Amino acid sequence: MKKSNRTTILLVIAAVLLAVVVMSKRISFDNRDIAVIETSIGVIEIELFSEQAPEAVANFLQYVNEGYYGGTVFHRVIPGFIIQAGGFYGNMSWKEGHEPVNIEPNNLTNVAGSVAAAGNNAGVSSHFFINVNDNRRIDGDVPVFGKVIAGMDVAVAISNVENYKRAQPPLNNWPVEEILIKKAYLK
């Protein structure tokens, strides 16, 4: 057998073995951080902007890695605006999180599918929201830290469930039908 034929055969075998290893180990050459949120009505996948919003991503991942979001609900749903989760159980009781941290808003935009940390003057903790529409009027007010890359139809469906529109907080915009987060994890 000629040397060039042996070299070709060895290269083909090496390529096949590499393909088998990649497929069997599910090795990913894509180094994006993807968070998966499994809800009672579907799955939402979020690409996290680790480079553009490192503090906000680190805060969110702390809760994801602790399993914090499992058993909580989307507690604020506003059609054409946002869906918010991250701090309440279905019985409307508060879920204790870590102390709020100060995370400065960034220059990322609140377009449909973007994900941002929700907070108040004390800072942000576990709460996050998904924009279901372009909401540029809140740009600069909240730290955007990701975008929905799969399951936007689920987010829109959540935003359209009936809610308590005229109730007092925390019931205002609380869904009549419970939308449970079963679990959240890194893909």
Image (cartoon, helix red, strand yellow):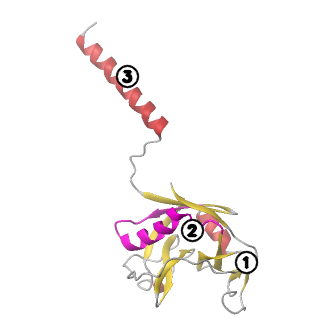
- Disc 3 crowd, CA 10 A, few/some/many (<14, 14-19, 20+): few
Q: Residue furthest top?
A: 1
Circle 2 SS class: loop
Q: Bounds of the magenta span?
A: 44-71
Disc nearer the start of the sequence (1/2) = 2
Callout 3 amino acid: Ile
Disc nearer the start of the sequence (3/1) = 3
* Image depth: mark 2 or mark 3 in front: 2
- Residue plotted at (43% across, 78% down): 143
Residue 174 point in image, percent of width and height? 69, 82
CA gap, disc 1 and disc 2 = 16 Å
170 lies left or right of 144: right
Disc nearer the start of the sequence (2/3) = 3
Tag 2–tag 3 contact (CB < 8 Å): no
Residue 12 point in image, percent of width and height? 36, 23
CA gap, disc 2 and disc 3 = 46 Å
* Image depth: mark 3 or mark 1 in front: 1
Look at mark 3 in the image and give the residue it sits on: 13
Determine whether 140 is above or below 132 in the image: below
Q: Quadrant of residue 87?
A: bottom right
Tag 1–tag 2 contact (CB < 8 Å): no
Whether residue 53 is visible here, answered yes or no, is no
Tag 3–tag 1 contact (CB < 8 Å): no
Residue 84 point in image, percent of width and height? 59, 77
- Residue 91's disc is 1
Look at mark 2 in the image and give the residue it sits on: 68
- Disc 2 crowd, CA 10 A, few/some/many (<14, 14-19, 20+): many
Q: As rendered, which of 175 and 80 lies closer to the eye? A: 175
Which quadrant of the rendered structure holds the N terminus?
Answer: top left
- Disc 1 crowd, CA 10 A, few/some/many (<14, 14-19, 20+): few
- Residue 16's disc is none
